[in-house]
Amino acid sequence: MKSIQDTMKITNAMYMISSSKMKRAQKILKDTEPYYFAMQDAIGRVLRHVPDIEHIYFESESGNREEKNKKIGYIVVTGDKGLAGAYNHNILKIAEEQMAKPGEHRLFVLGELGRHYFAKKNADVDTSFRYTVQNPTLHRARSIGERVIGLYRDGELDEIHIIFTEMNSAVAMEARMLQLLPLKKATFRRQQLANIAGMHNELIEMNPSAEAVLNSLVPNYVIGMIYGCLVESYSSEHNSRMMAMESSTKSAGEMLHDLSILYNRARQAAITQEITEVISGARAQKGKAN
């Protein structure tokens, strides 16, 4: 019972810490969303004026390389530690499913737990990619983004995906995969159609060219997406840990309740036994005196 009480204190403290960190991360995510949507809108405006542009950052409409020959990179966002329910398991499961598909796969793993897991599997993991997932910053997202975008531009990767956990609500989190590069024009066209009612069909001048503008916009957009995924995963990790610690604290309380009943029964049985022995002894002494 003493051991369970000590563990209960730890799980309760971890719940409080994760609660504080999650709220802070959610505020950061909310503050960065306007930037993400502004970048998306800017790219959409460029594509609206030059819809037929062929660009390295967008899927080619003339056809892509065969699936079995594609070089695909995956940014896998796991936690630095466990005790977060199925949070890490769901991410690793998606990553393994993708690795089983045709093509050449390369992993860029964030988080110590994921790195240790894939090291045991002897997977093709970029060992220089050693970033923590704690307290995500835009600077860290930029470092990650510039690294993978550079590999994409150099032809070492044909596609880049990020596997992260999306926080849909306080009780619902979903591990999912998002394609970072190449971008799909249809995504931005849908965004344009959603805003078409209040849209002003303005004339814009792109200097020195539309391609140069996209060369500047798209990397920042991808970096913004990576940052959003890092913050989302960080919030989801702490939310998962909150739920796991809350469940553990509740289970510990139930165990203490059951053990208290057993303890009291054993104590009462021992007291009853002692009283019975005292009464029996007293009767024996009384019989001898008579």
Image: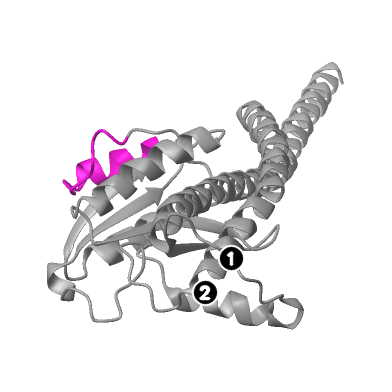
- The residue carrying pointer 2 sits among few (fewer than 14), some (14 to 19) or many (20 or more) residues within 10 Å by Cα, namely some
Residue 38, quarter of the rendered image: bottom right
Q: Residue at x 20, y 48 (%)?
A: 121
Assign a secondary structure to mark 2.
helix
Q: Can residue 116 be seen here?
A: yes
Q: What label sits on residue 49 in the rendered view? A: 2
- CA gap, disc 1 to disc 2? 8 Å
Residue name at image x 55 percent, y 69 percent: 44
Tell which of 179 and 256 is nearer to you. Answer: 179
Magenta region: 110-129
Q: Earlier in the sequence, mark 1 or mark 2?
A: 2
Residue appearing at x 31%, y 40% in the figure:
115
Q: Position of residue 12 (x, y in %)?
A: 70, 35
| Rendered view: 145 above or below 183 | above
| Badge 1 vs badge 2, beta-carbon distance below 8 Å | yes
Q: Is residue 119 magenta?
A: yes
What amino acid type should be assigned to the residue bearing mark 1? Answer: Ile
Seen in the image, is 274 located left or right of residue 193? right
Q: Secondary structure at mark 1?
A: loop
Quarter of the image with the N terminus is top right
Q: Is residue 163 visible?
A: no
Q: Is residue 279 magenta?
A: no
Residue 76 marker: none
Give the color scheme: rainbow, by chain, secondary structure or one colour. one colour
Residue 122 in the image, given as x and y percentages of width and height: 16, 46
The relative height of residue 33 versus residue 47 in the rendered view (above or below) is: above
Report crowding for label 1: few under 14, some 14 to 19, many 20 or more residues within 10 A (C-alpha): few
Left or right of 113? Residue 154 is left
Circle 1 residue: 204
Dot 2 amino acid type: His
Q: Is residue 259 left or right of residue 222?
A: right
Front residue of 240/49: it is 49
